[in-house]
Image: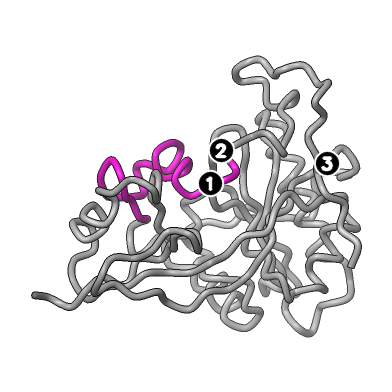
Amino acid sequence: MSLRVVRADVNQPSPRPGDTAATDPALDLVLDNPAWASLTGAHAHLGEGNDLARRFRSDVSPFSAVRDWSDPDVWAAILDLVGYDADFLAAPHEDVPVPAGWAHGNTLHGVQLVETAQVAARPDEEAVVLGAADVPEMIDLVERAQPGPFLTRTHELGRYVGLRRDGRLVAMAGERLRPGGWVELSAVATDERYRGQGLASRLALDVVHHARERGERTFLHATADNTTAIRLYEHLGFALRRGVTFGSVRTPAAP
């Protein structure tokens, strides 16, 4: 696998505030903590928490985030948010020790990719916008294709589109996290019987197109071992920005 890595150009002029087109993804620190930026920005109304720890509402998304793992008060903030003997779906860096009584959950290595100018974004005339009435079909497709978690209100995170065959939803894609100036491509799923027809690519390019229309750029996450998906996104023009680790911590049992 030969992903093109986005690198900072030290000779590039500093972007103006709000000028996302001029922002170098390698320097855009909002992408280092996109869940927190989303939960304190565009998706604040879909989350709950405090100044140090936040999470999405349970019917929207399982993801959580903290402002800064190095803040010594972050552990009390998490405990205040989720309570004792509970999982918090975010994990500190390996060099940040968890307090006594806390435990690391399973970890999963992944990658973060960002769009480049090579992405030939375009609207798909056959794509239909999906909403609340389509949730049962969307959940059914996600359960079969397994692109990642999708709940009853996940569609409220952004714009979701799909393709139908004989009235049945066979492919979908949409928007998840919304850190400032960026939107996360997510829930890219295709019915097994319709794979190999380029449906996922068409919908991904549609998502990128409409994000650009709003002045936003697109990024995404994939597990590091999902080489098929990573190759697809590289072929579309996405580039590796950094590696990421998905994980969780469990709060102590009640005293």
Residue carrying label 3: 116
Q: Give the range drawn in magenta.
A: 31-55
What is the total number of numbered labels drawn onto the structure image? 3
Question: In the image, is 253 to the left or to the right of 207?
Answer: left
Q: Is residue 31 left or right of residue 75?
A: right
Query: Alpha-carbon neighbours of circle 2 within 10 Å: few (<14), some, or many (≥20)?
Result: some
Question: Does the magenta run of residues contain 21?
Answer: no
Question: Does residue 54 show up magenta in the picture?
Answer: yes
Residue 186 seen anywhere in this rendered image of the structure: yes
Badge 3: residue crowd in 10 Å (few <14, some 14–19, many ≥20): some
Check whether the beta carbons of the residues at disc 2 and disc 1 lie within 8 A of each other: yes
Q: Mark 1 points at which residue?
A: 34
Identified by mark 3, the residue type is Thr
SS of the residue at dot 2? helix
Q: Residue at x 74, y 74 (%)?
A: 226
Residue at (67% x, 70% y) in the render: 223
Q: What element carries label 3?
A: loop
Q: Position of residue 98 (x, y in %)?
A: 34, 65
The quadrant where residue 252 appears: bottom left
Q: Residue 241 location in percent, x, y?
A: 73, 49
Q: Mark 2 points at which residue?
A: 30
Q: In this view, does 34 lie above or below 160?
A: above
Q: Give the CA separation, mark 1 to mark 3.
A: 18 Å
At label 1, which amino acid type do we have?
A: Pro
The span from disc 2 to disc 1 (Cα, nearest Å) is: 6 Å
Local crowd size for mark 1, using a 10 Å CA cut-off: few (<14), some (14–19), many (≥20): some
Q: Nearer the viewer, mark 2 or mark 3?
A: 2
For the residue marked with disc 2, what is the amino acid?
Val
